[in-house]
Amino acid sequence: MAAQLSGIASPATGASPEELRPAIEAVDLDTPLGNLNDAVEEIQRLYLRDAIYFHDTRYAAHLNCPVAIPAAAIEAMVTSVNTSMDTFDQSAGATLIERKLVDWTSRLIGFDPQKADGIFTSGGTQSNLQAMLIARNIATAKLQGSLPHRLSKLRIYCSADAHFSIRNSAMLLGLGVEAAVAIPTDPLHRMDPAALRRQIEADVQAGLQPMSISATAGTTDFGSIDPLPELRSIASEHGTWLHVDAAYGCGLLISRRHRHRLAGIETADSVTVDYHKSFFQPIGSSALILASGQDFGSITHYAEYLNPRSEAAGSANQVDKSLQTTRRFDALKLWTTLRTLGAGELGDMFDQVIELAEMAEREVALRDELRLVAPVQLSTLVFAFDAPHAALSRTQKNQLADQIRHRLYASGEAMIAATTHHGERLLKLTLLNPNTSLSDISAILDVICRVGREILSDQKAGIPL
Ligand SMILES: *Cc1c(COP(=O)(O)O)cnc(C)c1O
């Protein structure tokens, strides 16, 4: 893999599903090749050759990081021993290692490690779902009436820029998607506390029950951090759970320069962290941390064959706190990274991509065709390609943005993302690679401008957008 990865010259070959499908379809799964070498050779052709490489410095699309090498190396051990984390009798020391990492993360957040507890999960989506599940159970216990009636009263408040997994959680938890209320944001895309307070007061007046305020510390598009101290005050006034989704922003916990930006996170009831984003860990590596570990109680299920109630007192069975039963020992990857590189090094890498994004902001400003939509807050840049002198409709402008992104992918020159804001299709860079330099960014922006101009001149020549 080291040889393969160091031989990569672009983030993608630009292959389309149509180009990749025939070779994969042609494989006869009922006729084995009979040896691993041939199987790997086949995989090289079917997958590896055209894979998307996050460690390439022209990859700036989604929230994917290049992985810390100690974590990648230890993955073979995780898979070979195949420990399952549900019970102590399937994991032994692995459970204690995971618990120590949970305690360590709790301390970083500023929780009382005597009271706090947590669990590793598959990702931020699952961590958020579990946080909302626990908040739901606590809120329904306070209400009277039938369960459907109580569930219909609950409301979750998140910002309009929050991750969609919060809305999906409302749906999965039987509240309906409309139970997740999107609160307007300020120009920096942070939840507006005054608007939140008005919404909650109106809902309480209408007989509804605020279940949870779900703050975001590092929104996926803009990296914005909701005003945590204000949200804490509002949550306390209404006896409501405060969740902080720090799936992206959690890297600030180990930052030497920017830790203060998370001030107030220590007052949360629950926190989502994605080590597989800003701690440079391989997928999956995430955790849900609760200020009070007792709050896991509402989801504990005792199964006689696995974790019997008779062993509940002082149980070392992680399944008591997990939505998963059989579960990977993902914690070993973070452990190995900390024991090899240390948290300081990881935090410095996150600081470096933040600094890179700040420099990239100036590079965008230098180009007439590019217009930044909001100031850089973490390591993402959202901007428009404004065609000079081209009279395009809104729809055509949106098509142009998607065309630029597609052509970049197809050419393999760079990979960028896109998002929509107030109906405007925009381009986005997500920077999570500490090896990316300012000259890489400058080259990516130049390619965007060149490709944008090419598409416009094609259009003038009669090729529709
Ligand atoms: C990525 C992200 C998630 C989802 O996490 P996964 O690990 O992709 O499941 C949730 N919230 C935010 C803010 C994110 O950026």
Image: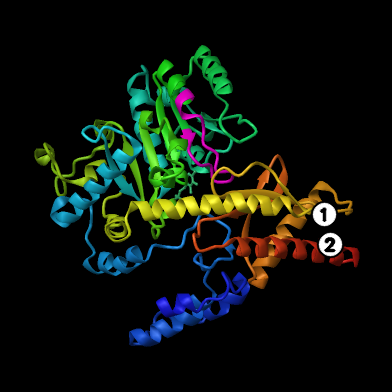
Q: Find the residue positioned furthest to the front.
A: 257
In x, y percent, where is residue 396?
81, 53
Indicate whether residue 204 is drawn in magenta: no
Q: Earlier in the sequence, mark 2 or mark 1?
A: 1
Coloration of the structure image: rainbow
Q: Which residue is mark 1?
A: 387
In x, y percent, where is residue 173?
42, 36
> Marks 2 and 1, how far apart in space?
8 Å
Q: Find the residue positioned furthest to the top.
A: 205
Circle 1 packing at 10 Å, graded few (<14), some (14-19), many (20+), is: some
Identity of the residue drawn at 35% across and 37% down: 109
Whether residue 312 sits left or right of residue 1 in the image: it is left
- Magenta residues, as a range? 215-230
Q: Are marks 2 and 1 in contact (CB under 8 Å)?
A: yes
What main secondary structure does the magenta stretch of the protein show? Answer: loop
Task: Give 381 or 273, whichever is nearer the viewer.
Answer: 381
Q: Is mark 1 within 8 Å of ligand 1?
A: no
Q: Which residue is mark 2?
A: 456
In x, y percent, where is residue 326?
26, 55
